[in-house]
Image (tube, rainbow, N blue to C red):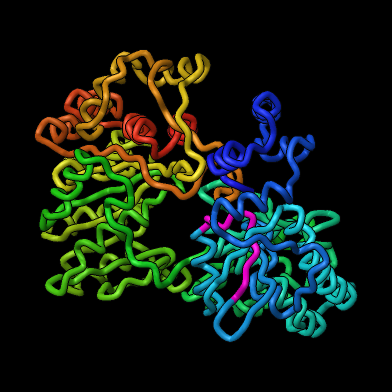
Amino acid sequence: MLLPKTLKTILKKYELGDTTSIDAAQAKAEKMNKSLEEILVGDGIINETDLYEKAGDFLKVPYISLKGKEIKKEILNLIPGPVAGTHQVVAFEKDKDELQLAMTDPTDIQTIEFLRRKTGLEPKIFITSPGDLKEALHRYHAELEDDLQIVQESNSEAGGSDLKKAAEEVPTINIVNTVLEHAVYEGASDIHIEPNEKELSVRYRIDGILKPVMTLPKNVQSGLIARVKILSNLKIDEHMIPQDGRFKIQIQDEKMAFRVSIIPVYDGEKIVLRLLHESTKPVTLDELGFLAKPRKILETAIKKPHGMILVTGPTGSGKTTTLYSVLGILNQPGVNICTIEDPIEYRMQGVNQSQINAKVGFTFAAGLRSFLRQDPNIIMVGEIRDQETAEIAIHAAMTGHLVLSTLHTNNAPTTLPRLVDMGVAPFLVAYTTNIVMAQRLVRKICTYCKKEYYLDKAVGDELGLVFDVKKISALFKDNIPKDYKDEGSDVEKIAFYKGEGCNRCGQTGYKGRLGIYEIMEMDEELIKMINAHGTAEDIKKYARENGMITMLEDGLVKAKMGITTISEVLRVTKE
C-alpha cells in the first residue's frame, strides 16, 4: 500500500478522481478507521491497476503485473512466506547477481536492505498492485498447506520414536524455521506457541505487545513441539513437567540464541521462546532515550569508584539492557568486571559473566561471595531478591566496589524502603547507594506515518488526574532543546503526535521502543531520611522538590518531542 502522502500527491498530479469524491472518501476512511486507498479502490472511485501504474511512473519504478505470471518455486521461497505477506513483497525472477522484487511500496528501504543481505543478490525493484500481490501470496499458502498436510498425516498418533521421526521430517523443519525466521525479521522479543482445543496458535511479542501471527492445525502440534525439544536438547517423551533449554541458529547474517520454556497446559504443552541477539552490541545512552539532565546524573554516578547503582521496574521494562549499556561504557582494559545473571542474555567481550545454578547451590549470594575473591572493580548482580544478596552487595559497595543491580519496585522512591524492609540496616542502604533509577519501555511513533494532532478533552482529563497540567509549559521549557515554542499550559491547545498506521509498522502506528526514566540521586538530606526510616512518600516529596523528573514527566517530554504518544506514556506509568 502507498504511503498516504505519496497517494495524495499521485491523485493530484495525475488527476485521478474528482476532489468531491476524494474528500468524501477521506471522511469515510477516518470514520471507518481505514486507509484512504482502501476506500478509493473498494468504492470504485479509482482503478487499482491504473493507480499503481501511475505510482510507478511517479516513483520512477517499473510496474509489473503478476496476474497469471509463472514464478518458480525456488525463487518464490527465497523470501519466507510470512515476511512476504507482512511486507508486501514477492521475488519473481533472478539471475546470477540480481533478484527481481515486486512490491506495493518500493520506498520501503528497510525491507529491500534486509533482502539484499539475506539473499546476497542485488534487488531490482518493481511496483505491483495489492491485488496482484495477493494472488502471488496464495502460492505460499498452497506450499504451507502441503507441508501441513504431510505433517498432519504423519503426526496423527505419533509417540516415542515416532515423535523423533516426525520432528526430523522436512515439512516440520520448514514450519519451525518459518516461525523462527519471521519472528527475527519482525523484531519480536518472544514467540508464544499455544495449544488450544482444536488448533495451535502462534503469537509474537513485538514492542511489548503480543500479536497473533498464525494458526496451525492441531495435528501439527506433536511434531512441532518435538522439533523445538530436539533443538533445545530436551526430553521429547516428557510431557508432564516443565522443561527449560536453549539453542542457537544462524538467521540472516547473525547468530541468534533462543531461550526455551515449555510447560504442560490443559490442551498440551505451551512453548515460549525468548529471542537473544548474541552479536548485538550494548546500546548507547543516546539510543536508550535519556534526556539531558537524567543522563548527566547517570554519567556522574558511573564515574564513582564505589557504591551502588540500582535499576528498578517490572519484568520486561528494559532494566538488564540499561545495565549492559552502563557496562559497555565501563568495560575498559584497566578494570575487572564480573557479573552474575539469571540467565546470561547477552555475551560481552572482556566481561566475566556467570550464570546462577540453584541446583548446585550457585545462587546470587554464593556467586557474590566468590566474586569478592576475584579482585573485581565492578560487579553486576542480575537481581537483588533477598536479604542475604542485598547485604553482600551492599558490603561489596562499602569495600571499594562499584555494584550494579536491579530490583522489582514501581518507582525510584520506594526502592530504598524496600531494601530496609528486606532486613538491611538503614544506614547501610543510605551510605552505599549512589543513585536509584526506575524505568519503563514505551513504543516509539512510526516515523513513516507520524502526524500532528491535539488532545481531546477525555485524554486531557485523564492526564490531569496524574499530573498538574498547569506545570506542563515549564516542564517542556526546561527539558526540550532550545527551539521549543511555548504553547502555554492548556493541554488541548498543545500539538502532540501519533502514528496513523502503515505497512511498515503493521498498522499499529508504532515501531521500536525506548525508555522513560526517573533518577533519584542520593544527598545528605536523603541519607538522613533513610536513617530515620522515612516513608516512600516522604522520599518522593523531597526528591520532587529537589528537581527529580518522574517517569510520567520524562514520558510527556518525549511525547511532546514526537518520539512517543501521550496514551502510550499513560499506559505504562499506571500503578
Q: Residue 206, position in %: x, y?
A: 55, 52
Q: Residue furthest front?
A: 14
The answer to whether residue 537 shows anywhere in this view is: yes
Q: Is residue 487 above or below residue 282?
A: above
Q: Is residue 558 above or below residue 512?
A: above
Residue at 83%, 66% in the rendered image: 68
Residue at 73%, 59% in the rendered image: 133
Which quadrant of the structure image shows residue 521? top left
Confirm whether the magenta stretch covers residue 103.
yes
Q: Nearer the viewer, residue 440 or 493?
A: 493
Q: Nearer the viewer, residue 104 or 568?
A: 104
Residue at 56%, 51% in the rendered image: 58
Q: Is 469 positioned to the left or the right of 243 in the image?
A: left
Q: Is 315 positioned to the left or the right of 341 in the image?
A: right
Q: Which residues are magenta?
A: 99-108
Q: Quadrant of the C terminus?
A: top left
Q: Is residue 172 above or below residue 526?
A: below
